[in-house]
Image (spheres, coloured by chain):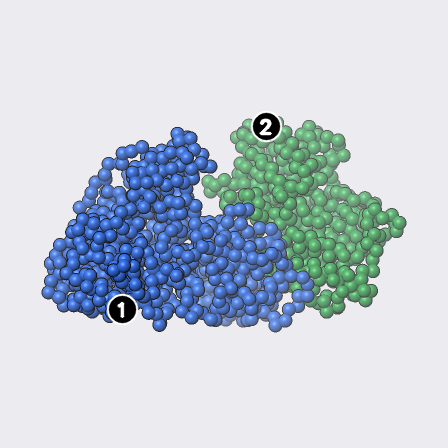
Chain colours: A blue, B green
Amino acid sequence: MTPEQAVVAVETVTAIIDGLEVTVPKGTLIIRAAEQLGVEIPRFCDHPLLAPAGACRQCLVDVEINGRAFPKPQASCTMPVENGMVVKTQLTSEVAAKAQAGIMEFLLINHPLDCPVCDKGGECPLQNQAMSAGRTETRFEGEKRTFEKPINISSQVLLDRERCVLCARCTRFSEEIAGDPFITLNERGALQQVGIYEDQPFESYYSGNTVQICPVGALTGASYRFRARPFDLVSINSACEHCASGCDLRTDMRRGKTLRRLAGDDPKVNQEWNCDKGRWAFKYLTSRERVSTPMIRGADGELHEASWPEAISAAAKGLVSKRTAVLVGGRATVEDAYGYSKFARVALGTNDIDFRARAHSEEESEFLAAVAIDLKTTYADIDTADQVVLLSFEPEEESPIVFLRIHRQVRRRGMSVSTDAPLASRGSKKLKAELITSLTQINGLTSNSVILVGERAAETQGALSAALELSESTGAKLAWIPRRAGERGALQAGAIGNLLPGGRPVSDSAARVDIQTAWGISNLPTVDGRSTSEILHGLGDGSLDAVVIGAVDPFDISADALNQLLNTFVVSLEISHSAITAIADVVLPVAAVVEKSGSFLDWQASARAFEKGVEDAQMRSDVRILSMLADELAAPINLPSVAATAREIESLGKWDGAKPTFAKRSASAALQGEMTLVSWRLLLDLGTLQMGEANLAGTAKHARAHISAGRAAQLGVTESDSVRITSELGSIELPVSIYAMADHLIWVPRNSENSQVIPSLGFTSGAVKVAKI
Amino acid sequence: MTKLTPVLSKNWNDADSFTIANYKKHGGYKALPKALSQTPDEVIALIKESGLRGRGGAGFPTGSKWGFIPQGDNKAHYLVVNADESEPGTCKDMPLLLANPHSLVEGIIIGSYAIRANHAFIYIRGEVVHVVRRLQQAIDDAYAAGLLGKNILNSGFDLEVTLHAGAGAYICGEETALLDSLEGFRGQPRLRPPFPAIAGLYAMPTVVNNVESIASVPAIIDNGNEWFQAMGTEKSKGFTLYSLSGHVSNPGQFEAPLGITLREILELSGGMRPGHQLKFWTPGGSSTPIFTAEHLDVPLDYEAVSAAGSMLGTKALQVFDETTCVVRAALRWSEFYKHESCGKCTPCREGTWWLVQMLEDLEAGRGTEADLDKLLDLCDNIAGRSFCALADGAVAPIISTLKYFRSEYILHQTNGGCPFDPIASTLFETAGA
C-alpha cells in the first residue's frame, strides 16, 4: 500500500479468493489482494509502483462477479477487486493453472538457457517462477530468436535482448517514474525489443532502477556484469551517503568488497528507487587513493607512515594549547558529527566549528539555528501538497528522490510546481515548473503547500528570509534541503558555531548547563563560534593556529581556502588522499560507510541508520579517533564507539527551551556588471565520491554554458560555438546552449569537467565577462 | 432466392462514381439536411432503432455505441473511422472508398453531428495510396462544397475531417491500437477500461466505427428504418457488402441483405472456377474459423454463422477449391499473424512464433500425430489468454482446419510431405482447369 492510500479514509470491498474472504481498499488489484492472503500469483510485468500493463499475461486467474463468470481467465494485475467477486487462482482453478503454465512455456521458448552465466541467475524471477510454475522439459523443438549481444544502451546499462521477456517494466519506469522516456520498445512480434533512439543513449539519472526491476537478466549494469553470483554475496542494510534524500540501500559485498548497491524498499522515503549516483558511485571505497595508515609529515616535508599511537601523539602535540578550529565537512554521520562537536567544545575549548564546506552566510547560520532545526516537513507533505515551490533548489540534481516524489504527484494529479531558477532545467521541464523571478508571482499558497529551499539560498542575501516570510505569511510548510547527506545530522549534532547538540543555543546559559551536566564538565565556551569562512580567514591571518578537518574539499569553499591552511597545523581525518592531506601535518585514516555503522539524518531530519559490512577493517569511525585524540589531549570525550555515541545522543534529547532569534535580512541589490554567472552542481560531476566510476561518469551531462538567445545574438555565437567566461581570478571555456533566460545571466555547471567554477572563477555566482572564442 | 441489393455499390459502374455530382445524382447528400434538422439524440435513436450493426467484424450495434458517449460533459468528442482494412481476404472498404467515398463523408458528418463531435478522423491503411488520394480528394471537394468546415448547410454545426494514413500494421485495426497510432505513438492495444467512449482519442470520448458502418448511415436516414429493416434477418438487419474472392469464376463485391448464403452468392456470381469443387471457405476473413461445403446454406448473418461455429466477421468470403492444401493455407495465415503480432503480450508474440514453426514442419511432412495434439494445446494456451483479439484470430484457422481436415494433416506425415501441387491452386494455372 502506498502512503497516499494509507492517509485517505478508505472505502473497502470484499471478495473471495481461493475460498478465503479478503477485504481490501477499493481499487486494489486482484493480484495484490491475493498477496494479502499469502497467495502468490506469478507475474512479470506487474510492479506495484507502475501503472498496470497486462502485457505478460502470467497472472491469469478465473474470475466471477455475482455469479457471472468471465468466459476467459483475466489478468489479475489489471483488474480491481469488486464486491461479490470470486477469484480462483492457480491454486484452485485448473483453467488458471493451465493458462499460467502455458504462458510460462511461451516465455521460455525464446529465452536462452544461459542461467549459469547470467548475472540474474540465482535471484531471477523468471528462473524462480519457471521452477515453480514451469514444465520440467521443453516441448519447443524450433529455432530460438537470437540477437547480437549485448548492446550498450548507455555507458552503464547493457541489454541482452534475447533474454528480454518484454514486460516493459523498464520502459514504463523510465516514462512514469523518472520522466525520461529515453528507452522504448521497438519492432514488433517476437522481434520486439527495448531500444534507444539512434544516438541518444539512456542517460537518465535513474537508469539503474531498470536494471533492478528487470525480472530477467536482460538489463545489466556494466560495473557489476559478470562480477559475482548472488549466492556469493553478503547483503547489508545501508543508507545512501550521497545526498540528503535519505535512500534506503542494500549493499552487496563479497569477501569484504562492495560489488553493488541496490535501492532498498522504504515506502516513506525512496519507495523502491534510487538514483544512479547512489547505486553506482561506490568505487571510492576501494580506490587506490584510500588512506590506509596514519601518516605524519616529517622534517623532509613528506608524509610518512606511522603507527596509530605515534600519529595520535603527533596530532595532540601539534594541537595542545593552540587556538584550534574544526571543519567537519558535509559527509559525516550523525555520530561522527557529534564527535567533532564534542571534541571542539571539550578537547579544544572552542565553538569554532562548522560543517558547511560550501558557500554560506551569517543569515544562514541564524536560519539553521532558529528555523531549520525545527522544520517538520516530510515526503508525505509533498505527496498531498497542492503546490510545491522550489527556491534555490534543483531537486533532480541536488536531491533526486525529492524530485521523484514531486514528479509522481505532477504526473498523477497535475500538482503545480514553481521554481526561482533562472532557466528551465531538464528536471524543471519534467515537473512542468513555472519559472518565477519574484516570490510575489506565486499565487494561492496554502497551509497545504510546500516550500523547498536548497542550500544555495545561502548564496543570496535575503533569500532564506524571504522563504521564511513566504511560509509564515501563507502557512505553507517549509523545508530546508541541503545537498550533502551529513549536513542535517551535523546541524542536529551541534557541529556549527552557534548550536550545541540537540539544537541548544550556545548563547543560552541553560542550554550550556544542560550539556555541561551531561558531559560532566564545568564550563563550555560561551561565545558563538566562527563560520567556515571566518575560520579560514583566522587561519590565514594568524588569529587561529591549527585546524582539525574532516572530509572537506577546499575548492568547494573558495579558491584560496587551501592557501590559508598553508602556515597552520592541520590534522586531517580522511578516507582518501586529497588536497587537504597533501598539506596536512598529520593524516588519520577513517572508515568509509561500509566499514562502519552509523546514521544520517535525511532532509526530513529522520534517522537513516546503516550497518557495518566489513568486520575486520582497520578503519575506525571519526568519532573513535577523535575520542583517542581527546584522551591524548587529556580532555576525554568518552566516545569509544559509534554505539556509545548514539546512546549519548539519544540521552541528550532535543532542546525544548527558548529558541534563538532570526533577524530577517532584506535582499541585497542585484549584482552590477555586464553579465552575472549563476551555477549549481549537477548530480553527476567531479564530486569526490564519484571517483573511479567511468561507466557512471559516461552518463553525466556535458558541461555547457547556458545563455539567452538575445545574448547569443549579441555575442555572435550559436550552439556550435564556445565562449570564454572571465572573472578577476581566471576563466573557463565552454560550448554554448541557448535557453529561455534573462539576457544578463549565464549559467554553467559548478563542478563538472571543464567547468570548475570556484577554483577557476573564485565564486559560485558573480560578475563575469563573456566573449566568443 | 435472395436478390442483390446495391445501395453503397449502386453507382460503382459509373465512370465518375467518386464525384460529388455523381453521388448526388444517385441521391447522395439528401440524408444530411434531414439529419441536421433533427436533434442529435433523435439521430442516435433512429440509428439505434434501425438495428444497424458494426460492419467491421464484431457486429456491435452502431446506435448503442454512439449512445455511450457522455453528453453535456464539456469535453471534445471525436468520431474515428477505422479504414485500416488489413485482414487477409477482407477487401470491402477499399473498393467502397475508391468508388463511392462520399457515402463515407456524408455518414461522417451525420455521425459526428449525432455524437456532438466537431472533429472526425479517418485512419486509413497507408499502403493503399490510390485510395488515400481518392478519399482526400472527396474530403477536399466536400469542404469546397460547404459540406465540411464551419456552419455546415447553415445548421450551425462545424466539422473538421482529418485523413490519417497508417504505416502498415494490422494491429492498428484494433480500435485502441488505432487510437495510439493516431496520437503518434506506436500502435499497441490499450488496457480497457477506460473504453474509448469514455477516454479514447486524446483521452476524450470517442466513437470508433468501421467505414462501411458509417457509410451505411446516410441511406438509412434517407430511406427510413422500415426500408432498412425490410432487408436482412431478425437480428441482423439491412444490407452489406460480401467480398467474394479465391477460386471463383467471378470474384468481387456483392451487396446483399444479411442472411444470404454462400450458395446463393456463388449462383449469382457464376460459381466456382470451372471444373473445380468447393473445399473450404472463410465467412469473414482469415480470423474466422473456416467452413466447408456443408455450410453452403448457412445464412450469412451474425447469429447463424456464429451458431455454425464461426463468425460473420467482415463477410470476406475466401473460397478455396480442392487444389488447395489446407495445411499450407493455415501456415500462410499463421505467417501473417506472426508477422503482425504487435509483441505486447506473451501468448500472441511467442505463440505465433511457435505455431509457424510447427506448421512449417507439419506441411513439410516432419511431424507426428502427437504434434497435432500439441498444436491444439498451444492454440488452447493462446486463445482467450492474450491482450487483444489478434491471437484469437491467429488460432482460428488452425483449430478449424484441424477440425475439418485432420486427416489431411496426417496425410502430410504418411506422405512424407505435402501431397498437393501448389501450382494447381494458383489462379494463373489453367492446365488443371
Residue B59 appears in the picture as rendered? no
Question: What is the chain identity of the residue bearing mark 1?
Answer: A
Q: Which mark is residue A678?
A: none
Extreme-front residue of the structure:
A300
Q: Position of residue B27 (x, y in %)?
A: 68, 32
Residue at figure coordinates x 20%, y 43% from the top left: A665
Are the two marked residues, 2 and 1, in contact with CB atoms closer than 8 angstroms?
A: no
Residue at figure coordinates x 33%, y 44% from the top left: A760
Q: Residues within 10 Å of mark 2 (few under 14, many from 20)?
A: some
Name the image quarter holding residue A570: bottom left
Q: Secondary structure at mark 1?
A: helix
- Relative side of A484 to B30, left or right: left
Q: CA distance from mark 2 to mark 1?
A: 95 Å
Q: Position of residue A589 (x, y in %)?
A: 30, 64
Give the quarter of the figure containing the C terminus of chain A: top left
Q: Position of residue B153 (x, y in %)?
A: 57, 28
- Relative side of A138 to A561, left or right: right
Give the quarter of the figure containing the N terminus of chain A: bottom left
- Residue type, mark 2 in image: Gly
Of the pair B422 and B406, the residue shown nearer to us: B422
Of the pair A704 and A276, the residue shown nearer to us: A704
Do pointers 2 and 1 mark residues of a single chain? no
Q: Secondary structure at mark 2?
A: loop
Name the image quarter holding residue A615: bottom left
- Residue type, mark 1 in image: Trp
Q: Position of residue A608 (x, y in %)?
A: 32, 62
Is A21 drawn above or below residue A555 in the view shown?
A: below
Mark 1 sits on what residue? Answer: A308
Name the image quarter holding residue B257: top right
Mark 2 sits on what residue? Answer: B146
Residue B147 appears in the picture as rendered? yes
